[in-house]
């Protein structure tokens, strides 16, 4: 966890993610990334020069077999208030709309529901669990399926809602998250979504894993290229 806290503190400082008095909602899916982020932010809260509040929120998609009890127990253990927001997103996406590409609509609806919840709570920032490997995967997804070279930003201001998205784990690698889950017995709740592990992102992840095996230093070089704003060498 020391490595994660060090990388997270660097990201928070580099991108001015957290200021004194911030009220931060951590979006909790129950997966390893969001659960690790919650625990890391709780630890960081103890020594952060900026004082901030934390609140954990889970959007329930409406799947019957989604058990949030381990999340509730963990939040209670580390003293973070927790709220579950019940939605019918799964019903709309899979039953009513029967979306051929359900992930896109689902993500849009989840973002809207989470933003509304943050405003209702009176909080001003949302912390999301995207890490460095997610940034690389997003860049390749954009290149392969959209013809764009782009990825998510560490900090995004949503002017219509007057809230910020922050991603404190952008310098953290997925293997560090997996290690933290195992070492600190952080609970993980399996996603009940039928599309879990059956997406274009998963295909890109597997492709990148093959590249990393062939060129071991490629992951670090890709991360460097994302943050190297002065050396693109693209056609204009």
Image: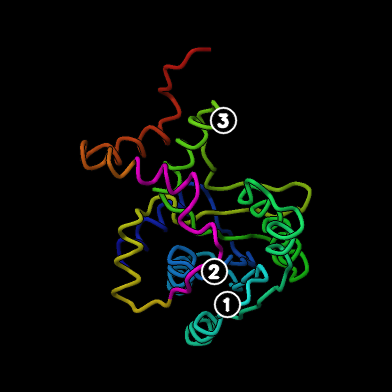
- Tag 1 residue: 65
Dot 2 or dot 3: first in sequence order is 3
Question: Measured from the top left, where is residue 166 in percent x and y?
Answer: 56, 54
Q: Residue at x 36, y 39 (%)?
A: 223
User: Sequence-wise, which precedes: disc 1 or disc 2?
Assistant: 1
Q: Measured from the top left, where is residue 167 in percent x and y?
A: 52, 54
Instruction: Mark 1: give few (<14), some (14-19) or many (20+) Cα within 10 Å.
Output: few
Nearest to viewer (mark 2 / mark 3): 2
Location of residue 89 with respect to 133 vertically, above or below: below
Name the residue: 78% across, 69% down.
120
Q: Are marks 1 and 3 in contact (CB under 8 Å)?
A: no
- Point out the tag, 1 or 3, that comes first from the N-terminus: 1
Magenta region: 188-207
Labels 2 & 3 near each other (Cβ < 8 A): no
Q: Main secondary structure of the magenta part?
A: loop
Residue 146's disc number: 3
**Residue 49 colored magenta?**
no
| Pointer 1 with pointer 2, Cβ within 8 A | yes
């Amino acid at each position: 966890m020391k490595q994660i806290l060090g990388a997270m503190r660097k990201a928070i400082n580099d991108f001015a993610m957290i200021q004194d008095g911030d009220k931060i909602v951590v979006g909790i899916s129950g997966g390893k990334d969001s659960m690790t982020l919650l625990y890391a932010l709780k630890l960081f809260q103890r020594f952060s020069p900026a004082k901030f509040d934390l609140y954990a929120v889970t959007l329930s998609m409406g799947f019957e077999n989604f058990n949030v009890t381990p999340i509730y127990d963990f939040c209670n253990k580390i003293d973070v208030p927790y709220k579950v927001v019940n939605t019918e997103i799964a019903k709309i996406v899979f039953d009513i709309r029967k979306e051929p590409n359900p992930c896109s609509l689902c993500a849009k609806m989840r973002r809207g529901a989470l933003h509304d919840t943050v405003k209702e709570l009176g909080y001003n920032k949302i912390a999301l669990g995207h890490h460095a490997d997610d940034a690389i995967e997003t860049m390749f997804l954009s290149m392969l399926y959209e013809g764009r070279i782009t990825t998510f930003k560490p900090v995004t201001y949503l002017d219509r809602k007057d809230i910020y998205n922050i991603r404190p784990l952008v310098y953290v690698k997925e293997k560090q998250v997996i290690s933290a889950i195992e070492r600190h017995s952080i609970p993980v709740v399996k996603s009940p979504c039928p599309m879990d592990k059956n997406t274009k992102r998963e295909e890109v992840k597997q492709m990148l894993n093959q590249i990393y095996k062939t060129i071991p230093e490629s992951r670090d070089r890709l991360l460097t290229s994302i943050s190297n704003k002065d050396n693109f060498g693209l056609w204009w």
